[in-house]
Image (cartoon, rainbow, N blue to C red):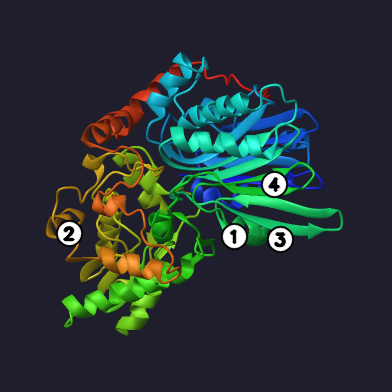
């Protein structure tokens, strides 16, 4: 899960990209990077940390140029090393930089083929570096003898990437001195959109993971990229688009609507806010259906992503809605943190209960989803410590039973509390008096209402139906081995003992 942005403007874009990354910070809090282009020179700054920590005034002054790309990340495929912060760079052809949101499911096979057939060296374990080199090779093959890449060459290269790469990916890339490219996987699992701003010097263009990044900078949303589509914006501001896949099908990730995206974003013509309102309505309808004689006194959301659903749920049930938890906004997203102990500690640091909203009451806590169960268990205990008589729990999403392989760091089935367990067993483990999950059909209906043209969503974390890539039991087993909590701890220990200098563009402190 990452955030990407690219801007072609008529003045320096460093501050605009920085501002966009802060708006997209919820999509990645482990590392950030910006690369800009001035003439035929590239200027890079990237490192581990939040946007505000990675970029100081001295870095911003060096990021000159009227076009550039930026990235914020959580480590999914690959490690959390600063060497794997994005964007990545390769010098041939033309000088390419690339940032990527998603996950290639065949990255190991691609890396092997890149070495044996394309004679390209991959220096990290990041699938983003693999994707960059695949694109670079394909563009080189089509641009032989050309000092300036043509749009058709670029689009043909993207089409070749689609034929070779499997999985989910939304990409923004920059061709030194020539322009910015963005493209989306043939199933449109990961989001990317573009917008335009008219100035006295002509139009400026921007691509980003979410529409809110565009609106915050004064760009008008034009539309989302279609699945398999590529958009190329020249340094002079000329816009070119082309579908680069012969059988695209829009199957966006439904977890974007549940949790990943900001509520003020519009993704694939679906208002995230409205979708979450409808999730609350559907969940209330289920409570009325399966528990008509409920004794709920108050509905309390787990801030922030469940507020919208919880408020609508309370209204529909005609039950009081109260803000019972106060959030410390300086603690990152806990479900992505490595290790149960760190998650448990961070939940206690992140939330504080207002006792008078719990004391002597039957409380329904509403969250967006239940992943590992750590957050839910700790919050339920906090509610009981605050004096709640009974604590019920509702999830705006169905039970997360299967690993996510498309760029959300939920890779290990064994770490998912609902995997191979019944709802009653999960209820007992998290310590609730009653547990209510959203039905998958209701979730799909709540999201689809915003865009009836979407025939199917990627719901793989709920139903185990993987739409892209050759996902089988062996793949999931290997994924778990590489990316479970124990593996992450081992990599962190190794990294702590190593000199972790970035072999890339000059990246001075």
Q: Residues within 10 Å of mark 2 (few under 14, many from 20)?
A: many
Task: Give the mark nearest the N terminus, 4 or 2.
Answer: 4
Foreground residue among 113 and 269: 113
Mark 3 to mark 4 CA distance (whole Å): 12 Å
**Pointer 1 residue:** 223
Q: Are marks 1 and 4 in contact (CB under 8 Å)?
A: no
| In this rendering, the label closer to the viewer, 1 or 4 | 1
Instruction: Give percent across and percent down for residue 228.
Output: 50, 47
Task: Give the mark nearest the N terminus, 3 or 4.
Answer: 4
Q: Quadrant of the N terminus?
A: top left
Asked whether residue 356 is in view, the answer is no
Mark 4 to mark 2 CA distance (whole Å): 47 Å
**Pointer 2 residue:** 427
Q: Are marks 2 and 1 in contact (CB under 8 Å)?
A: no
Residue at left 63%, top 61%?
221
| In this rendering, the label closer to the viewer, 3 or 4 | 4
The image's mark for residue 218 is 3
Q: Secondary structure at mark 1?
A: strand
The image's mark for residue 251 is none
Q: How many marks?
A: 4
Q: Secondary structure at mark 2?
A: helix
Instruction: Give percent across and percent down for residue 237.
Output: 77, 48
Q: Residues within 10 Å of mark 3 (few under 14, many from 20)?
A: few
Instruction: Give percent across and percent down for residue 248.
Output: 45, 50
Mark 2 to mark 3 CA distance (whole Å): 46 Å
Task: Give the mark nearest the N terminus, 1 or 3.
Answer: 3
**Pointer 4 residue:** 7
Q: Residues within 10 Å of mark 4 (few under 14, many from 20)?
A: many
Foreground residue among 289 and 109: 109
Task: Give the mark nearest the N terminus, 1 or 4.
Answer: 4
| In this rendering, the label closer to the viewer, 4 or 2 | 4
């Amino acid at each position: 899960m990452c955030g990407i942005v690219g801007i072609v403007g008529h003045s320096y874009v460093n501050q605009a990209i920085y501002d966009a990354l802060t708006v997209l910070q919820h999509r990645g809090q482990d590392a950030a990077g910006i690369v800009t282009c001035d003439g035929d020179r590239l200027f890079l700054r990237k490192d581990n940390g939040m946007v505000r920590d990675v970029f100081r005034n001295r870095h911003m002054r060096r990021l000159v140029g009227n076009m550039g790309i930026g990235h914020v990340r959580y480590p999914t495929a690959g490690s959390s090393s600063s060497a794997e912060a994005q964007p990545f760079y390769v010098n041939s052809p033309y000088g390419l930089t690339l940032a990527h949101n998603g996950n290639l499911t065949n990255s190991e096979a691609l890396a092997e083929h890149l070495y044996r057939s394309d004679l390209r060296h991959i220096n990290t374990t990041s699938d983003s570096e693999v994707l960059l080199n695949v694109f670079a090779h394909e563009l080189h093959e089509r641009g032989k003898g050309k000092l300036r890449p043509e749009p058709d060459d670029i689009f043909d290269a993207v089409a070749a990437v689609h034929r070779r790469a499997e999985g989910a990916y939304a990409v923004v890339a920059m061709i030194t001195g020539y322009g910015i490219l963005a493209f989306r996987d043939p199933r449109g699992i990961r989001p990317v959109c573009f917008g335009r701003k008219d100035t006295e010097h002509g139009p400026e263009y921007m691509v980003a993971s979410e529409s809110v990044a565009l609106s915050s900078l004064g760009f008008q949303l034009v539309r989302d990229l279609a699945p398999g589509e590529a958009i190329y914006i020249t340094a002079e501001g000329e816009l070119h688009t082309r579908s680069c896949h012969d059988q695209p099908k829009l199957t966006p990730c439904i977890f974007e609507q549940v949790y990943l995206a900001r509520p003020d974003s519009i993704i694939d013509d679906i208002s995230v806010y409205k979708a979450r309102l409808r999730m609350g309505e559907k969940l209330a309808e289920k409570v009325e259906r399966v528990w008509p004689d409920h004794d709920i006194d108050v509905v309390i959301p787990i801030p922030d992503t469940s507020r919208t659903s919880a408020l609508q749920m309370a209204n529909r049930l005609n039950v009081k809605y109260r803000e019972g938890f106060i959030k410390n906004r300086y603690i990152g997203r806990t479900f992505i943190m490595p290790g149960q102990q760190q998650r448990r500690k961070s939940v206690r640091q992140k939330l504080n209960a207002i006792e008078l909203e719990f004391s002597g009451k039957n409380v329904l806590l509403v969250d967006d989803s239940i992943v590992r169960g750590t957050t839910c268990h700790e919050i339920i205990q906090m509610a009981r410590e605050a004096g709640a008589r009974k604590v019920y729990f509702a999830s705006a999403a169905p039970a997360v039973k299967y690993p996510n392989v498309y760029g959300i760091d939920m890779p290990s089935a064994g770490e998912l509390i609902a995997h191979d367990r019944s709802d009653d067993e999960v209820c007992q483990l998290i310590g609730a008096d009653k547990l209510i999950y959203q039905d998958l059909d209701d979730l799909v209906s709540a999201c689809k209402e915003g865009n009836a043209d979407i025939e199917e969503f990627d719901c793989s974390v709920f139903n185990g139906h993987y739409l892209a890539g050759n996902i089988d039991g062996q793949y999931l087993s290997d994924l778990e081995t590489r990316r479970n909590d124990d593996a992450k701890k081992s990599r962190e220990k190794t990294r702590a003992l190593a000199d972790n200098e970035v072999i890339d563009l000059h990246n001075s402190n």
